[in-house]
Image: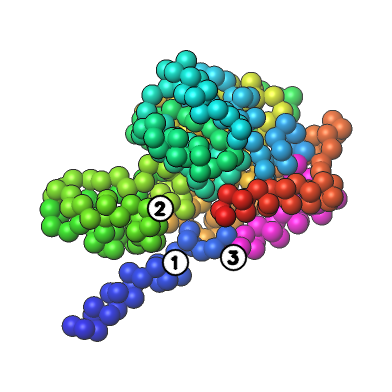
Amino acid sequence: MKQLIFLKNIKNSAFFITLFNWEYWPMWLTNIPVVFIWLWFALRARKLFFFTAVNPVIETGGVLGESKINILNRIPNEVLPKTIFVSKDADFQGILMKMKSLKLAYPIIAKPNIGERGLLVTKIDEEVRLKNYFQKNKIDFLIQEFVDLPYEWAVMHHRLPDSNEGQVTSICIKEPLSIMGDGIANIRTLMRQKPRAVLQLNRFEKDAQPLLNQIPKKGETIELEPIGNHCRGTKFLNGNHLIDEQLNATFNQIAAQMDGIYYGRFDMKCASPDAVKKGDFKVLEYNGIAAEPAHIYDPTYPLSKKYQDIYQHWKIIFKIYKIQQAKGEKSMSWSEMRASYKTYSNYMKSLTS
């Protein structure tokens, strides 16, 4: 009996879960093959940072240091949530006045204007918490309305320069981290029983202890994380079966209005697949070259197919680059990229310090 409990504890440990699930491996490890893919296309381009010419209006093409508001301003308003840009030296009362003028009510989402992997993205439900976020984080950030729609998708799309025709190449359906109550155990215990939640438990112990002590009713589903980020426990599922001509046409129409942007991923919320095909959704963010075809993080997706799909997406990036090169678009030099990286690295250290 003790041996069975011991083996069960090992199986449910964070180390074991991480070791046997590719989606949780560290980025430096999973990206080793990606580096070789990049270098192969860089060799063909004879430019190490050829990809920076693909989205010329986005800083570094969307690899690092890109401004979220710069990108959102290039997306049609009809698919955007209400959004306010807040500079680091803004006046708090001025923020409240902007929110009032936009009729922006709580809850809201606050997020750094420059950032990645959900860092400092926070759901805020009252003014005092917004003030605390503003005073604690002396950075440029965005305030967005909380889009209360049931489905969150990540849709990869590209188009060739001087063409309004493009293609959706990846759909990821995000399943938020949640647990179901049994009327007996508290949320902490229920999280220990769910591998995906185990990896988030330390974070919840630090930031949400009162929640962990609650005992949900039997059959009650508790959504633990409103931010649809993989590193926060969201499950990514392959939705490529939903790609069709109507979906392509919808995203072609939107992308055609985004001058200087040809490749990237729409992170969005929607009511249903049919609503998306009709253009009825809200784009929370848009990510450029560094955006992955997120369907590859589906736990059931074969490892070899993951890297095949990554290769195909780099092939698309290279194809767009060749067109941009012929048009005279310049990619960043080594010194320019090094300077961008240094600036970005210092900025990220300031966020985490």
Q: Position of residue 184 (x, y in %)?
A: 13, 57
In the rendered picture of this protein, how many numbered marks are placed on residues? Answer: 3
- What kind of element bears circle 1? helix
Q: Which residue is mark 2?
A: 233
Q: Position of residue 148 (x, y in %)?
A: 36, 30
- At label 2, the amino acid type is Gly
Q: Which residue is mark 1?
A: 18
**Magenta span main SS:** helix
Residue visible at 18% across and 49% down in the picture: 216
Tell me which segment is drawn in magenta: 28-52
321, above or below 260, in the image: below
Q: Residue furthest top?
A: 101
- What kind of element bears circle 3? helix
Residue visible at 68% across and 31% down in the picture: 261
Residue 33 lies in the magenta-colored region: yes
Specify the quadrant of the image occupied by residue 255. top right
Say if residue 319 shows up in the picture: no
Quarter in which the C terminus is drawn: bottom right
C-alpha distance separating marks 3 and 1: 12 Å
Residue 92 lies in the magenta-colored region: no
- At label 1, the amino acid type is Thr
302, above or below 274, in the image: below
Colouring scheme, one of rainbow, by chain, secondary structure, one colour: rainbow
Residue in front for this viewpoint, 197 or 318: 197
Which comes before the other along the chain, label 3 or label 2?
3
Q: Position of residue 247 (x, y in %)?
A: 50, 28
Residue visible at 64% across and 36% down in the picture: 67
Q: Which residue is mark 3?
A: 29
